[in-house]
Amino acid sequence: MPRARRVTAAGVIQHVMNRGNRRARIFLKPADYEAFISILIEASRRFRVRLIAFSVMPNHWHLILVADEEGAISSYMEWVTGTHVRRYHKLYGLEGTGHLYQGRYTGVLVQGDRHLLTAIRYVESNPSRARLVPRAEEWPWSSLGAPADIKDRLVAESPVPRTPDWLELVNQPLPNLARIRDCVARGRPFGSLVWTAKTAARHGLGFTMRSRGRPRRRRP
């Protein structure tokens, strides 16, 4: 599959993620999580990007971001991952030992309606779905479970407000989990069928709409 294009338009909502090289753990102790979150807080002051949901897991992380200007998310992600790699390698004496991440981050455009709430649920329920905690809000390194002072400094208001019963909703199984995972794996926009098709065409992501595998040969 072709390498996904970076969408740089202002106003877009993106679900971005990356994981450790060969799926190795990159957060080994609480201080590692705290250091990464401090980088996110610093990035929020440097770039015109709003972070509306996040979850930092043992070997990967998810962020949902809104760009307030052209190219902001690309600049934000380049700085966040680059700063994290440099600080991590320096802390553990790993300079020159290879890649920390498996590659470039994955970015999925998200429609700003109920699909955004589904994407936020997917991100914030990640710890409980991975059975790291019984309930999602018990994971302290996410936008759901982080202490209030972290949320105040880092988490922006969602363009689509979370519902009053949000805690219970996040802890319920996601009915369209397979579709969200497929969008993340393929870089396919996540939204209604009409919005997805139009968005893929507008941003040069048409290849993400194709079926997996080689195309069938036409019979003569």
Image (cartoon, grey):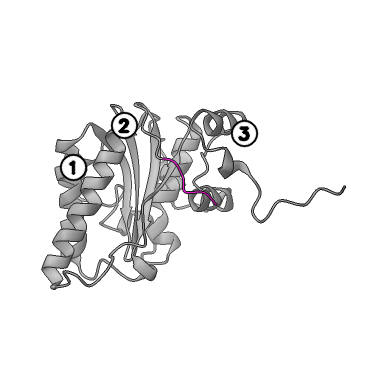
Placement of 197 over or under 79, stated as above or below: above
Placement of 77 over or under 97, stated as above or below: above
Outermost residue toward the front?
Answer: 220
Placement of 185 over or under 116, stated as above or below: below
Q: Residues within 10 Å of mark 2 (few under 14, many from 20)?
A: many
Outermost residue toward the right?
Answer: 220
Q: Earlier in the sequence, mark 2 or mark 1?
A: 1
- Side of 175 relative to 92 (left or right): right
Q: Separation of disc 2 and disc 3 at Cα?
A: 23 Å
Query: Dot 1 corresponds to which residue?
Result: 43
Q: Residues within 10 Å of mark 1 (few under 14, many from 20)?
A: many
Magenta: main secondary structure equals loop
- Side of 203 relative to 214 (left or right): left
Residue visible at 15% across and 37% down in the picture:
46
Q: Are marks 2 and 1 in contact (CB under 8 Å)?
A: no
Query: Dot 3 corresponds to which residue?
Result: 193
Residue visible at 28% across and 65% down in the picture:
100
Q: Residues within 10 Å of mark 3 (few under 14, many from 20)?
A: few
Q: Amino acid at mark 3?
A: Leu
Residue visible at 15% across and 51% down in the picture:
38
Query: Dot 2 corresponds to which residue?
Result: 67
Q: Earlier in the sequence, mark 3 or mark 1?
A: 1
Q: Separation of disc 3 and disc 1 at Cα?
A: 33 Å
Q: Is residue 88 magenta?
A: no
Q: Position of residue 4 (x, y in %)?
A: 46, 45
Q: Is residue 43 visible?
A: yes
